[in-house]
Image: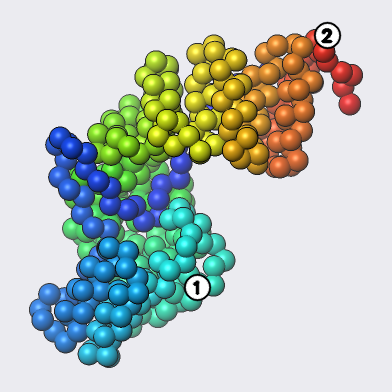
Amino acid sequence: MAMPVTPSAPAPLAAPPAAPVSAGSSFPPPLPTTISLSSGNRAPGDADLAAGDDAFTQGDLTLARKHYEAARAAAPRNVAPAVGLARVRVARVEVPLDYAAGRGNPEIMVAAKDLAVLTRAAPSFGPGFVELGRALLLLGDASAAVGALRKGTQLLPADAEAHSQLGIALLATGHAGEAVTELARAVELDPGSAARHGNLGTALMMAGRTKEAIAEYEARVRIDDNDARAHSDLGTALLGTQDLPRALSELQRAVRADPGRASLHSNLGYAQQQAGRVDQAIAEYREALRIDPKLVSAWINLATALAIDPSERADARAALEKARALSPDDPRVKANIEELDALPLGPRGHPKP
């Protein structure tokens, strides 16, 4: 029977939020991810632009919109207020900040079109290109996002968020090496951001640089020890170095921090199975599926664990059929079914269909 499906590091965030710095941490406070729209020269509307940026950073979108509208009224020819309003429009859509999480969303599509017009009207205004790149990432158009964000980093070379967004777009287009360069620059500029360390860790994992990825995930955990995803990512990376004791410890901490997330239970089950604790692995897979019955990887992993015992292979086949029903074209399901069919059934088994 094939090995269980290796848990992979989650896709990096499309707009990493600022994370709290743990007590006693040697890291500085994280920088805001909101790029300033004000010029800082007391031009008309600048005070409202700065106030809008502050409100946006605090999550008060209504107040942010009010200030951006006031800035537009004070300086109608300035594109910055319009960029702010497009930023608010995107943020009002309650979708996760993951890549392609807003694919097809009409509000984000309108905002992206507005931002494209604004960048053509003001080709030297860096924040417009970064906000356009953010919107395109949420829409799942990584190639177009790369173009916008390259321009954004050229105009804002010292802005961590611009480099971070470009790195994420490069990662989404399969350019892990270039992504590492951009995300490393973001970490250099904003070393206190847990999310930036996590994104760099993911890029390093995708580039096959596991030990370096572990160092970034460790930094992320030191910054925010309460983040379940941080512990899960670290545990997953440690599995790649066969450090099972530490991997198990981190994955167990992830489950304790967020027991209601199915993928964390499945990842822990994988580590338990790798450690030879098959019964515990099965229990974790079943808990993952209780939380999310549509988690295909958990059905596959449950099947691989059940198939170890010949008397459980009929149940393993049933688990794989569940996975196939959920994802008919998943090559992992097909491969596991073929390997399972080649194994003998035990006393509790049934004739093969």
* Disc 1 crowd, CA 10 A, few/some/many (<14, 14-19, 20+): some
**Disc 1 target residue:** 107
Colouring of the image: rainbow
Which amino acid type is shown beneath numbered disc 2? Pro
* Placement of 14 over or under 57, stated as above or below: above
Residue beneath the point at 32% across and 37% down: 226
Quadrant in the picture for residue 55:
bottom left
Q: Spot the residue most to the top.
A: 347
Quadrant in the picture for residue 86:
bottom left
**Disc 2 target residue:** 347
Mark 2 or 1, closer to the camera: 2
Which amino acid type is shown beneath numbered disc 1? Glu
Depth order, front residue of 307/261: 261
* Placement of 112 over or under 336, stated as above or below: below
Residue 293 visible (yes or no): yes
Residue beneath the point at 37% across and 19% down: 246
Residue 236 position within the rendered picture, expressed as x and y whole percent measured from the top left:
43, 29
Q: How many marks?
A: 2
Q: Is residue 333 left or right of residue 182?
A: right
* Disc 2 crowd, CA 10 A, few/some/many (<14, 14-19, 20+): few
Depth order, front residue of 101/201: 101
Residue 59 position within the rendered picture, expressed as x and y whole percent measured from the top left:
32, 64
Q: Is residue 42 left or right of residue 18?
A: left
Quadrant of the snapshot with the N terminus: top right
Label 2 vs label 1: CA separation? Answer: 58 Å
Residue 297 visible (yes or no): no
Label 1 secondary element: helix
